[in-house]
Amino acid sequence: MTQPSLPPLPTFADVLAARRVINRYLRPPPLHNYPLLDELLGAQVWVKHENYQPIGAFKVRGGVNFMAQLPAEQRALGVATASTGNHGQSVAYAARLFGVKAVIVAPEGANPVKVAAMRAYGAEVRLLGEDFEAAKKRCAEAAAAEGLYFVSSGDEPSLIAG
């Protein structure tokens, strides 16, 4: 049995293009210098505070970049993804930003705070499967049956570029 080919990895040019797209929707997170940390490490250190992002994590950039590039025909149908937390929040946030239906499939034991956050961004969250792999399989099946675009958390070049 042959393995399906994966999409190409994003290039540095893709990352720079993603930055231009993302900057239209999100402000860059603040950078702070902490003199005590500089002293401890013997170098000047700047900390990039991703916790200032709307979902509290860097993954929101990937979701926004992905959704911005999703064709209008697919936006009208919606997206589905499997997640246990931050990826699902990023897709849910970006879907709300672009007016796209989002279905997030999480394992039955998923963190209730993360599930609540995905729902708060407007996603339909389905708790299916005992672990992530089972949830991912159920999500792919649901996406195919419902005409939703399956957003892979690791194989989506525009998501990764973001």
Image (cartoon, rainbow, N blue to C red):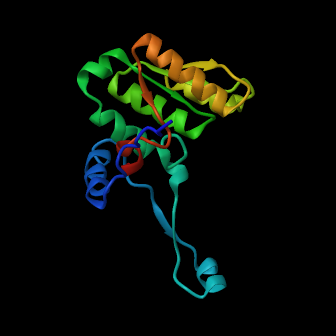
In the rendered image, residue 64, in percent from the top left (x then y), is placed at 37, 39
Closer to the camera in the image, 62 or 155: 155
**4 vs 79, nearest the viewer:** 4
Relative to 15, 31 lies left or right: right
Q: Residue placed farthest to the bottom in the image?
A: 42
Question: Compared with residue 29, is residue 41 higher up or lower down, i.e. above or below?
Answer: below
Tell me if I can see residue 53 in this picture: no
Q: Please report the residue visible at 61 percent of the width from the left and 36 percent of the height from the top.
A: 85
Q: Residue furthest top?
A: 146
Residue 109 place in picture, x, y as percent: 75, 27
Q: Please state which of residues 21 and 107 is positioned toward the viewer in this rendering.
A: 107
| Residue 48 appears left or right of 13 | right
Q: Is residue 123 left or right of residue 75?
A: right
Q: Residue 98: horizontal and vertical position, in percent?
A: 33, 27
Extreme residue in the front direction = 1
Q: Quadrant of residue 4?
A: top left
Residue 151 higher or lower than 86, as above or below = above
Residue 44: x %, y % from top left: 52, 82
* Residue at x 58% of width, y 82% of height: 38
* Residue in view at x 55 percent, y 22 percent: 139
Total label count?
0
Could you tell me if residue 160 is visible in this image? Answer: yes
